Image (spheres, rainbow, N blue to C red):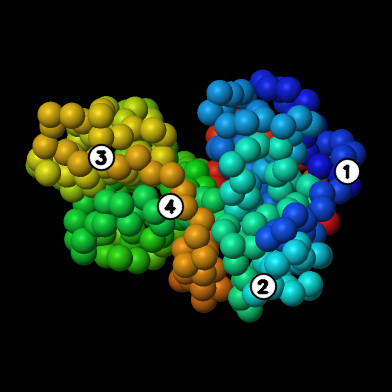
Amino acid sequence: MRAVILDSVPADPAVAEVDTPRPEAGELLVKVAASSVNGFDAATAAGHLQGMMEHRFPLVIGKDFAGTVEALGEGVEGFAVGDAVFGVVMKPFLGTGSLAQYVTVSAGYGVGSIPAGLGVLDAGALGLAGTAALDSVNAVDPGKDETLLISGATGGVGALAVQIAAARGAKAIATARPGAQADFVTALTTADLHLVDFNGDLQAQVRQIAPDGVDAVLHLAGDGAQLAGLLRPGGRIASTLGFGPDAVAGQDITAYSVMADANAQTLATLAADAASGALRVPVTATYPLEQAADAFTAFGAGALGKLAVTCS
């Protein structure tokens, strides 16, 4: 099969021919129709995960997938050949990823059904970013009319988090530069958003909106300590970038280090919301598998939203 691989790290992803995987006991073999590029994938290629997870080379990269079940491993129940599924590759090692024509995934974790109304391209860009966004918002649990600063609102996780927070009635403050970034973020929701430019005086801009500090922060980009300094006493910060409780020791702040947990309930919630139109998957560009390297280049250059990759 054709797949996006790394022969070593750090390295640029490249498309090559590799063996088609076979499902082990408890696994599904999925024929992948669509995937996407995530920060996790870029970090893998850059070598940032060396020493943190086992790397098996040639390493097929990719976390998100959407497609159809091609075969069942021994003992699998609840799925049948031909089922439309999506999710996140959640194996404890790196090497058998989803930027490929086929992927094997656990039938018990990281996979869910694609409901009617959710297109396969959107499903293939939803799993990891959607889970990270939902888990981050849930961690700080913004109440109605509480102020929530979302740093990194123009990325895939941030764009979904903006929508989730706005739907809950939070007073969302999103980082976006004037122009294309601001236009992208404001189009995500019909709710009122406050935009702040991270390249300007962030503290002054935020304090103008929330003089006593914001109630909560999502740290998806930027400096965690700087963002924590914008919280009111008793505020909460959730970070997908490793900023956790130790970083705020002795302060009247609660910090959560978020690791996306793509469990069945989370995936079902995201899929249902996306299928109903309550949540829009922010796909801004689509690349064929053979041009996946271009998607990584665009991601590294700060592309807005999600970059999808078609794999069939």
Quadrant of the drawing holding the C terminus: bottom right
Q: Depth-wise, is mark 2 or mark 3 nearer the camera?
A: 2
Q: CA distance from mark 4 to mark 1?
A: 34 Å
Q: CA distance from mark 3 to mark 1?
A: 43 Å
Q: Of helix, strand and loop, which one carries label 4? A: helix
Q: Depth-wise, is mark 4 or mark 3 nearer the camera?
A: 3
* Mark 4–mark 1 CB contact (< 8 Å): no
Up the image or down, 24 lies above or below 213; here it is below
* Mark 4–mark 3 CB contact (< 8 Å): no
Q: Of helix, strand and loop, which one carries label 3? A: strand
Q: Amino acid at mark 4?
A: Ala
Q: Depth-wise, is mark 4 or mark 2 nearer the camera?
A: 2
Left or right side of 21 for 133? left
Q: x, y percentage for residue 248? A: 21, 30
- Give the quarter of the image for residue 152: top left
The answer to whether one can see residue 47 in this image is: yes
The residue identified by callout 4 is 133
Left or right side of 150 for 129? right
* Mark 2–mark 1 CB contact (< 8 Å): no
Q: Amino acid at mark 3?
A: Ala
Q: Residues within 10 Å of mark 4 (few under 14, many from 20)?
A: many
* Mark 4–mark 2 CB contact (< 8 Å): no
The residue identified by callout 3 is 255
The residue identified by callout 1 is 19
216 and 10: which is toward the camera: 10
The residue under the point 71% across, 48% down is 98
The residue identified by callout 2 is 77
Q: Of helix, strand and loop, which one carries label 2? A: loop
Q: Residues within 10 Å of mark 2 (few under 14, many from 20)?
A: few
Q: CA distance from mark 2 to mark 3?
A: 39 Å
